Image (cartoon, rainbow, N blue to C red):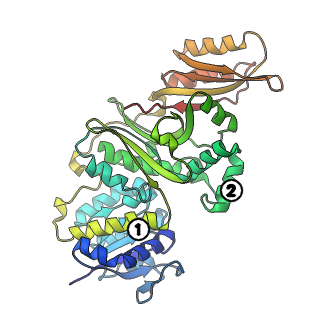
């Protein structure tokens, strides 16, 4: 029986896991595909002792794999965007199908890549680009295809979730837990992509496109990180019955799409609030099915390889099917994509947690509440704590309000000479179905 030949570009953590899964489960995979899957060519700058590549052709130039006429499917696992984009477009131009785990590549260049694939009659699969081993893209694009998706909310970066979990459970500062995450290998030496929301924004871009049938629009995602979260915020949230999670949220408001990544207070009783450590979870609300939750390992060698190999299996099955009969890349046919606008953050409405420090003087709190009222902001709950060096910590929860109104109110409050201008603001979402 003729085998389907796979070329792997990149032999890092996910690349080595992919080799191991393909070799270990070769018999099971062949039964599912109907043909054997053979690793024909690997492109990597160096070998990885985590996998055995004996008998497999190896090149130090990944473009050798893209140009190999024997390769049917190119698996791009080198990361980054510039070289990866050129590599994938080269392989597509050579008539090869693509599997990638590269969320940045898809979020930033996916529209271009899909168009090229359409023109050359090949497929691009990228399940591993979002939430590692959780098959969330297939669930969203195929399993929930009968639904109008109302919203998607996810913990889609394990590093940020680990930091917030450890801050809460160990009563430790952000800086202390970040250093530990770096020592454990959960966070990079430069943790910006994880803790400032860039990684999650790449993934949210992809989720939103599949959920709502809109083009990939990474540049329109609002991003806010977790580096300003303090133990005081974590404890105050708990007093109000919430936990702080770094969420990616995509919501169809009827007037446009919200795309935002930021720290969020969510009720403790919601299942998403119980997701701890480096684990990922995505909650989806559909009009027919209601709320559903998908949980699992969002990173790691074999969890991510599980999704990569699943894509290889799917493409292997489809190699005998006409290109136009396959499932569209983003779940909707290219000529049916919606032009529904993405809302700016100023036009998003939600509740807010506010932490501010005011001077211990009469009338200060009245000034703050008057400014909130002037901007149509209603208070749901408020706690005044003991004074510390002449400043009184005040924590306020508000009802739902437009962000533009909140920004105007906070600007006026910060201008008061009786209020410290370092005001903490965290959005609140109840994630009601």
Quadrant assignment for the C terminus: top left
Left or right, 334 with reference to 173: left
**Mark pair 2, 1: CA separation:** 36 Å
Q: Going 52% across and 77% down the picture, which residue do you hit? A: 50
- Residue 364 showing in the rendered view: yes
User: Quadrant of the rendered structure where residue 87 is?
Assistant: bottom left
Q: Going 31% across and 42% down the picture, which residue do you hit? A: 212
Q: Going 50% across and 21% down the picture, which residue do you hit? A: 399
Left or right, 388 with reference to 7: right
User: Quadrant of the rendered structure where residue 338 is?
Assistant: top left
Count neighbours of disc 1 (C-alpha within 10 A) and say few if under 14, some if 14 to 19, many if 20 or more. Answer: some
x, y percent for residue 390: 82, 22
Q: Is residue 425 above or below residue 127?
A: above
169 vs 215, nearest the viewer:
169
Q: Which residue is mark 1?
A: 86
Count neighbours of disc 2 (C-alpha within 10 A) and say few if under 14, some if 14 to 19, many if 20 or more. Answer: some
Q: Nearer the viewer, mark 2 or mark 1?
A: 2
Tag shown at residue 180? 2
- The kind of secondary structure element at disc 2 is helix
Q: Is residue 258 above or below residue 322?
A: above
151 vs 213, nearest the viewer:
151
- The kind of secondary structure element at disc 1 is helix
- Residue 10 showing in the rendered view: no
User: Quadrant of the rendered structure where residue 385 is?
Assistant: top right
Left or right, 91 with reference to 375: left
- Of labels 2 and 1, earlier in sequence is 1
């Amino acid at each position: 029986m003729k085998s389907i030949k796979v070329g792997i570009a990149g032999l890092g953590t996910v690349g080595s896991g992919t080799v191991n899964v393909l070799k270990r489960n070769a018999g099971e995979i062949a039964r599912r595909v109907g043909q054997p899957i053979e690793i024909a060519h690997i492109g990597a700058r160096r070998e990885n002792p985590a996998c055995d590549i004996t008998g497999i052709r190896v090149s130090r130039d990944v473009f050798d794999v893209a140009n190999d006429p024997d390769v049917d499917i190119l698996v791009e696992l080198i990361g980054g965007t510039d070289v990866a984009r050129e590599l994938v477009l080269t392989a597509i131009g050579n008539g090869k199908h693509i599997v990638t785990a590269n969320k940045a590549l898809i979020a930033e260049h996916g529209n271009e890549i899909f168009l090229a694939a359409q023109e050359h009659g090949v497929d691009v699969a990228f399940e591993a680009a979002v939430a590692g081993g959780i098959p969330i893209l297939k669930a969203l694009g195929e399993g929930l295809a009968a639904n109008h998706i109302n919203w998607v909310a996810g913990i889609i970066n394990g590093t940020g979730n680990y930091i917030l979990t450890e801050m809460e459970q160990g009563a430790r500062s952000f800086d202390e837990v970040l250093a530990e995450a770096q020592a454990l290998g959960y966070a990079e030496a430069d943790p910006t992509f994880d803790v400032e929301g860039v990684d999650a924004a790449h993934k949210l871009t992809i989720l939103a496109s599949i959920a709502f049938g809109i083009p990939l629009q990474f540049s329109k995602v609002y991003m806010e990180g977790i580096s300003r979260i303090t133990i005081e915020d974590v404890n105050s949230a708990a007093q109000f019955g919430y936990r702080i999670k770094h969420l990616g949220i995509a919501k169809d408001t009827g007037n446009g799409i919200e795309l935002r990544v930021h720290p969020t207070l969510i009720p403790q009783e919601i299942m998403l609030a119980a997701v701890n450590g480096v684990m990922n979870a995505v909650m989806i609300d559909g009009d027919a099915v209601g709320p559903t939750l998908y949980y699992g390992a969002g990173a790691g060698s074999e969890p991510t390889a599980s999704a990569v190999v699943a894509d290889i299996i799917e493409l292997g099955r489809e190699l005998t099917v006409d290109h136009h009969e396959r499932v569209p890349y983003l779940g909707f046919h290219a000529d049916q994509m919606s032009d529904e606008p993405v809302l700016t953050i100023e036009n998003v409405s939600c509740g807010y947690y506010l932490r501010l420090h005011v001077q211990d003087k009469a009338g200060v709190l009245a000034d703050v509440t008057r400014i909130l009222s002037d901007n149509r902001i209603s208070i749901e709950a408020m706690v005044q704590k003991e004074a510390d060096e002449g400043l009184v910590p005040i924590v306020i929860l508000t009802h739902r309000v437009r962000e533009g109104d909140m920004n105007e109110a906070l600007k006026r409050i910060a201008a008061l000479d009786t209020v410290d201008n370092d005001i903490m603001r965290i959005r609140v979402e109840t994630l009601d179905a």
